[in-house]
Amino acid sequence: QPLDTLTIMKGMGVHTTEVAAGRYLVQWRLPKSTVPKDTLVHIWYGNDTSLEEKFQPNVTESYLWSPSTREVTKVSHTVLETTVPIPQGRYLLQYNPYLLQDYITETPKLELYQYDVLHGERIGIDIFANPIYISDKGRFLLSMQETGWILYDLQMHDQQDLPVDEQAWSMPYFSDANDRVVFTGGQGMLVYDIVAQTATEVKGLKESVTLVNAVVKQLPTRKGQLIQSSVGLSQPILLKQHNALMQTTGYMLWDGEKSFSVIPPVAKQVSLVHFDAT
C-alpha cells in the first residue's frame, strides 16, 4: 500500500534513512500493550532480560518505501525488535536488543541478522561483541572477539580472522574504496589489505596516532555500539602523533607510501588544525 495510506499517529517521531536502490527505511515508535492500570501485582522474574520494557514499553515499526513505485514493505520483526539502516547501504542490520542481556556487561553482545533491501531476504550472521565497526555503505563489519579482530563480508558471507593484535591496534577505519582497513593505536599505524589479507605496519610511526581527517559516526540504535568509521586514502591523510611521556604533539602527512612532518612535535598544545587535501 502507498505510504500516504499508512496511519502514522501525531507525535510518534518518524525517521527516514535513504538506503540502496533509491529506497528509504521509514521508522517510528509505537506503544506496546501494557499491563492494565488496575492490576495490583506485577511479577518480575530474575531471568528476565528486558526489564527496561517495564518502564518503556515501546516498539519500533520499520518499513521500506520506494518513492518511484510507491511500494511499501514491512521489515519489522516480532523478535528482532531493532532494525538499523546503513545510509546508502544494501543491507539492514536486525537484532533482539535483550537476547544476550545479563545486566553485568554494559554493552552485551548482539546476535545479528542482515536484511537484503534488494531481494527482501533475511539471514542470520553471527554473534558480535560491541563496538561493531561498519564500512561505508555497509558491506563489511569489524568486531573484536575473544580470538582477536574479525572481518565479516555481508555480500559474500565470508569471515576473515585478522592477523592484527587487538591490544596494540584498537581503532579501525575503513578506506573509501573498501579495500583496506587502517588501524591506529599507541604504537603508530597499521594497514590491513582486505583482498590480499596482509597487514603492514607503517614505518616511522612509533607513537600514539590519530587520523585527523577520518569520519566517525555512531549509528542511532538500542543496546549496541554500531560505528561507521572511514578515511579517504585517495588523497594524503593528516596524522596527529602524541607522545604521552614527553607530552608533545606533532602532525604528519601520509600519502599511502611514506609520511613526512607538517608540524614537528611541540610541547605547546595545538588547538586547531585546518586541513585541505586539495
Image (cartoon, helix red, strand yellow):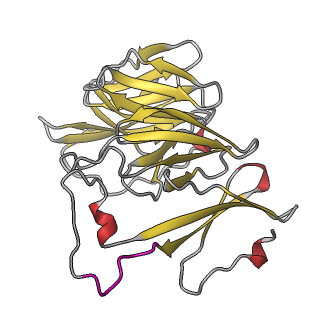
- Residue stretch rendered in magenta on the structure: 32-39
**Residue shown at 21% from the left, 76% from the top:** 41
Residue 34 colored in magenta in the image:
yes
**Residue shown at 51% from the left, 21% from the top:** 159
Quarter of the N terminus within the rendering = bottom right
Answer with the quarter of the image where residue 67 lies. Answer: bottom right
Q: Main secondary structure of the magenta part?
A: loop
Q: How many marks?
A: 0
Answer with the quarter of the image where residue 202 lies. Answer: top left
* Above-or-below relation of 117 to 62: above
Q: Residue 151: where, in percent of width, then height?
A: 48, 26
Q: Residue 16: where, in percent of width, then height?
A: 63, 66
Q: Residue 112: where, in percent of width, then height?
A: 48, 40
Residue 9 colored in magenta in the image:
no
- Is any atom of residue 236 visible in this view? no
Direction from residue 130 to residue 65 in the image, left or right = right
Camera-side residue of 235 and 91: 91
Camera-side residue of 277 and 125: 125
Camera-side residue of 195 and 106: 106
> Outermost residue toward the left?
245
**Residue shown at 52% from the left, 13% from the top:** 197
Quarter of the C terminus within the rendering = top right
* Above-or-below relation of 45 to 1: above
**Residue shown at 29% from the left, 87% from the top:** 38
Q: Residue 96: where, in percent of width, then height?
A: 43, 50
Direction from residue 51 to residue 234 in the image, left or right = right
- Is any atom of residue 272 visible in this view? yes
